[in-house]
Structure formats: structure tokens, C-alpha cells
Image (cartoon, rainbow, N blue to C red):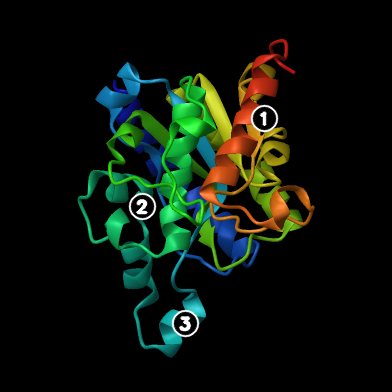
């Protein structure tokens, strides 16, 4: 069985449990399960096997909005329930990277930067415009990557409350662990402030030893004076290079 087939089988088992948890915890987005995983398995096997982990996807409609706008919530859920990263990278759907606004595009420009740096590149190797944004139009190298959202129900604008996320984690721990096990990455990039902490509740030590903490790809500002408080693609690359270099110098499972 291929990794992709194993993930599809896992998601079929996980879907009812996740939806049940989303309803019990009164998540803003219910009746949906948003799959993710490996973009292109053949490319992944030939590549550096990087897994990007985020807390949750941004879902365009809540149940209440679907009802208010006279959308069928189940139909609305079906429209949201696809592997957005793969759809965008492969150019197989309506979500073309070149047509995205800057914030959405950053998911891919910054994932590409992190991938290249993890493969040996340096921040100065890339071309940026006068605003520090990456100049890139080829995102095909990301076919070698995998993407995972911990909360498969999705969020809405802001991250799910930590207490509710913890409850979801504990109720779905075996599935989250199994997804990482199937993907079996060499490097796990935790995109967001609480991702590494969340994974600490469900992953084994050998998996946690592969984790590098980084800002969320859409982050535009930081509270410290470092970098002038603004996060451009160039700043993001410099920060990730610093963190990745520190991670490589650590002993395993730290």
C-alpha cells in the first residue's frame, strides 16, 4: 500500500471521529473534514521529505454563514473539503498561486524558502523585490513536500481556543500520530507558535526530535523590535535559516 492510499484509509476512519469532536466542542466549522498529506508521492520519495504542520486550515464559511446566505451546510462543507495545498501547487483547481492575494501566496513562497534552506540554501541565494518579497513563479519543488493541519475541521479567521484544541488533540491523538507515522518525514516544520507544543502531546520522542519551530507563513508582524517588527519573505528566510541551523546543531530527540 502506498503512503497516499494509507492516508486515504486513515482519513476514512478519522472523519467521523473528527466531526463528532468538532460538534461536541462547538467549533465554528462543523460537518467537515479537510484532508491533507503528501502533494505528490513520487516526488516526495525523491525529495527531502519535509512535513509542514499547521494548527488548522482557514475555512470560508461557518454553519451559520451557510444558513444565513442560504447555502446548504453540507454542500458548503464539501466545497471546503479538499487538499488545498496540493490543489494549488499542482494547479489542478481554481486556487492558482499566481492569482492569490499576498497573504495567501505567502503559504507557498515561505514554504518554498524553508524547503530550499533545509536543502542547503541560504537567505541570500534568493531574489526579492524592493519590499523584501520573494520573486518566484515556479512552486513545483513543493510537490516534494507534505502538509498537515492538526485540526481537520478547520478554523475561522483566528485559531481555535487552546483548551478546545487540547480536547480535540486528546480525542484524536492516535489519528494525528498515525498520519505523521505514514508520512514519515525527515524534517517537521511547525508553522505557528503553538504547533510544536500541540504535537508534544501526541508524537513520540523520535518524531519530536525532527521538529523545527517557525512562525506561521502568513505572519506579517512580530512584537519585538528585531527586523523592525515587520516580517517580509526575506526576514522570514533569515529567521528560519537561524532556527534551522540551531536545530541541526542539537543532539537527536531534543
Which residue does the numbered mark 3 point to in the structure image? 65
Residue 153 in view here: yes
Question: Residue 14 at what x, y percent from top left?
Answer: 47, 43
Question: Residue 24 at what x, y percent from top left?
Answer: 63, 62
| Crowding at mark 2 (Cα within 10 Å: few <14, some 14-19, many 20+) | some
Which residue is pictured at 42% across the width and 80% down the height?
66
Question: Upstream in the sequence, badge 1 or badge 3?
Answer: 3
Question: Upstream in the sequence, badge 1 or badge 2?
Answer: 2
**Left or right: where 75 falls relative to 254:** left
Tag 1–tag 2 contact (CB < 8 Å): no
**Left or right: where 84 falls relative to 189:** left
Which residue does the numbered mark 1 point to in the structure image? 243
Question: Does dot 1 land on a helix, a strand or a loop?
Answer: helix
- Which label was assigned to residue 84? 2
| Crowding at mark 3 (Cα within 10 Å: few <14, some 14-19, many 20+) | few
Q: Identify whether 65 is placed above or below 35.
A: below
Q: CA distance from mark 1 to mark 2?
A: 27 Å
The picture quadrant where one finds residue 199 is top right
Question: Residue 165 at what x, y percent from top left?
Answer: 68, 52
Amino acid at each position: 500500500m502506498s503512503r497516499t492510499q494509507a492516508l486515504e484509509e486513515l482519513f476514512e476512519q478519522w472523519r467521523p471521529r473528527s466531526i463528532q469532536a468538532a460538534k461536541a466542542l462547538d467549533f465554528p466549522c462543523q460537518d467537515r473534514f479537510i484532508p491533507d498529506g503528501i502533494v505528490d508521492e513520487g516526488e516526495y520519495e525523491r525529495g527531502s521529505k519535509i512535513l509542514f504542520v499547521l494548527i488548522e486550515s482557514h475555512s470560508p464559511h461557518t454553519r451559520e454563514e451557510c444558513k444565513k446566505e442560504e447555502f446548504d451546510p453540507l454542500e458548503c462543507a464539501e466545497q471546503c473539503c479538499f487538499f488545498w495545498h496540493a490543489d494549488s501547487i499542482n494547479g489542478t483547481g481554481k486556487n492558482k498561486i499566481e492569482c492569490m492575494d499576498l497573504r495567501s501566496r505567502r503559504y507557498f513562497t515561505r514554504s518554498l524558502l524553508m524547503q530550499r534552506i533545509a536543502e542547503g540554501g541560504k537567505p541570500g541565494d534568493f531574489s526579492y523585490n524592493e519590499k523584501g518579497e520573494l520573486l518566484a513563479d515556479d512552486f513545483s519543488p513543493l510537490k516534494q513536500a507534505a502538509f498537515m493541519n492538526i485540526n481537520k475541521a478547520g478554523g475561522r479567521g483566528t485559531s481555535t481556543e487552546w483548551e478546545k484544541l487540547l480536547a480535540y488533540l486528546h480525542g484524536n491523538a492516535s489519528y494525528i500520530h498515525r498520519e505523521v507515522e505514514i508520512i514519515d518525514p525527515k524534517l517537521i516544520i511547525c508553522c505557528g507558535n503553538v504547533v510544536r507544543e500541540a504535537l508534544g502531546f501526541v508524537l513520540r520522542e523520535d518524531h519530536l526530535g525532527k521538529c523545527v519551530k517557525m512562525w506561521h507563513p502568513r505572519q506579517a508582524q512580530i512584537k519585538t523590535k528585531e527586523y523592525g517588527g515587520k516580517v517580509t519573505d526575506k526576514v522570514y528566510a533569515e529567521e528560519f535559516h537561524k532556527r534551522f541551523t540551531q536545530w541541526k546543531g542539537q543532539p537527536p530527540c531534543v
